[in-house]
Amino acid sequence: MDEELLAKLYKAGQRDFSRANLEGADLRESNLWWIDLEWANLRGADLVGANLKGANLIGANLSEAFLDEADLSGAALYGANLRDANLRGTNLSVADLGRANLTGANLIGAILERADLREADLRGAKVTSEQLDQANFLHGLIMPDGTKRE
């Protein structure tokens, strides 16, 4: 599926795009709130400035995606692959990132207020301790240095 078809179907009211292949898609500044992209392939997609508020991205492949300044507040990202993703300045407040793979991700400036990071993997990620202090759930979190938080 290409980004033009996605935009057309979304505008027509369709919200379920689970398992869609959108690898490398240009969805910059798209307004896709409450979209269902469960298990979708968004590897390398450009989602800079996109509105994905409340989106279902459970198990989605967002590795190497560009999510800078995107709004993912309240999004379900449980078990999502965000390896080496760019999340600079992204709003992840109240997002469920439990068991998400965030290894090597750039989270500098991301908002993690009340985010659920239970058992997420942050090895090698760029994130500050101040950002992590904003999150609610950190049990089992693998820290950037590889240590596990109990």
Image (tube, rainbow, N blue to C red):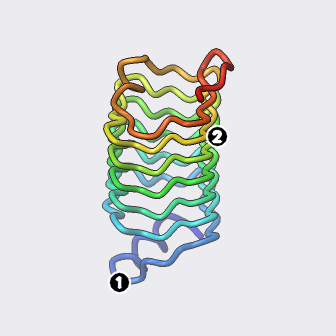
Q: Type of residue at label 1?
A: Gly
Q: Quadrant of residue 122?
A: top right
Q: Nearer the viewer, residue 104 or 143?
A: 143
Quadrant that contains the N terminus: bottom right
Question: Where does the image place residue 84, in percent across and percent down from the top left?
Answer: 62, 32
Estimate how packed mark 2 is, as few (under 14), some (14 to 19) or many (20 or more) residues with alpha carbons within 10 Å: many
Lateral position of residue 50 relative to residue 26, left or right: left
Residue 89 image point, x, y percent: 34, 31
Q: Quadrant of residue 64?
A: top right
Q: Secondary structure at mark 1?
A: loop
The residue lying toward the viewer, choosing from 92 and 50, is 92
31 over 117 or under it: above or below: below
Image location (x, y in percent) of residue 20:
61, 69
User: Which residue reaches farthest front?
Assistant: 150
Q: Is residue 64 above or below residue 26?
A: above
User: Where is mark 1, residue-wise?
Assistant: 13
Residue behind mark 2 = 101
